[in-house]
Image: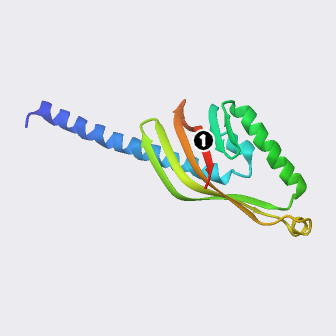
């Protein structure tokens, strides 16, 4: 093998190794973003930081499409604040199941079932509140925005 060909060979090997590492890093980053999305379900201010400013939000019940993420998140925070005022000692958390993630360069799509779980405090139970789990089907589209993965589109339907 000529010296010129050896250099080309090593360059090709390095390019392949780098592209697999970059793809693996992106996949890890996308999974970390989805973990953060679920973990911040009860902290919408933190969750808002995971989204692009122009995120589109679609929900199936009641049917709604919001294209202004700031207004949408303010609306969601208002609902959460009201729930917290009614029972400040309640527990609210999300879980997900059957997650499927596909990464396509600087874009990614995830689909999963999400459970939103509400557990009232003893005082809340005395006031007529009860345990509640809302089951949803969720699709999240993510994209690299200025080098960081962000949620750019969310679609939620009742399961």
Question: In the visual, does 115 lie left or right of 1?
Answer: right
Task: Using the rendered view, name the quadrant where residue 39 is placed.
Answer: bottom right
Query: Which residue appears at 74% of the width and 42% of the height?
Result: 45
Question: Relative to 33, does residue 99 appear above or below in the rendering?
Answer: below
Q: How is the image coloured?
A: rainbow
Q: Position of residue 38 (x, y in %)?
A: 63, 53
Quadrant position of the N terminus in the picture:
top left
Q: Is residue 52 visible?
A: no
Quadrant (top left/top right/bottom left/bottom right) for the C terminus: bottom right
Above or below 40: residue 5? above
Badge 1: few (under 14), some or many (20 or more) residues near its Cα, within 10 Å?
many
Q: Residue at x 24, y 35 (%)?
A: 11
Vertical placement of residue 37 versus 55, above or below: below
Q: Is residue 7 left or right of residue 61?
A: left
**Label 1 secondary element:** strand
Residue 128 in the image: x percent, y percent? 88, 65
Along the line of sight, the residue nearer the viewer: 46 or 91: 91
């Amino acid at each position: 093998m000529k010296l010129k060909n050896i250099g080309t060979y090593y360059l090709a090997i390095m390019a392949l190794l780098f592209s697999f590492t970059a793809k693996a890093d992106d996949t890890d980053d996308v999974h970390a973003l989805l973990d953060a999305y679920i973990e911040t379900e009860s902290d919408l201010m933190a969750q808002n930081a995971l989204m692009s400013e122009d995120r589109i939000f679609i929900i199936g019940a009641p049917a709604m499409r919001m294209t202004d993420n700031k207004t949408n998140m303010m609306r969601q925070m208002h609902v959460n604040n009201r729930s917290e005022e009614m029972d400040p000692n309640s527990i609210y958390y999300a879980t997900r199941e059957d997650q499927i993630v596909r990464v396509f360069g600087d874009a990614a799509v995830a689909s999963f079932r999400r459970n939103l779980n509400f557990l009232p405090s003893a005082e809340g139970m005395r006031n007529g509140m009860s345990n509640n789990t809302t089951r949803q089907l969720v699709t999240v589209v993510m994209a690299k925005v200025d080098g960081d993965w962000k949620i750019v589109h969310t679609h939620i339907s009742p399961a």
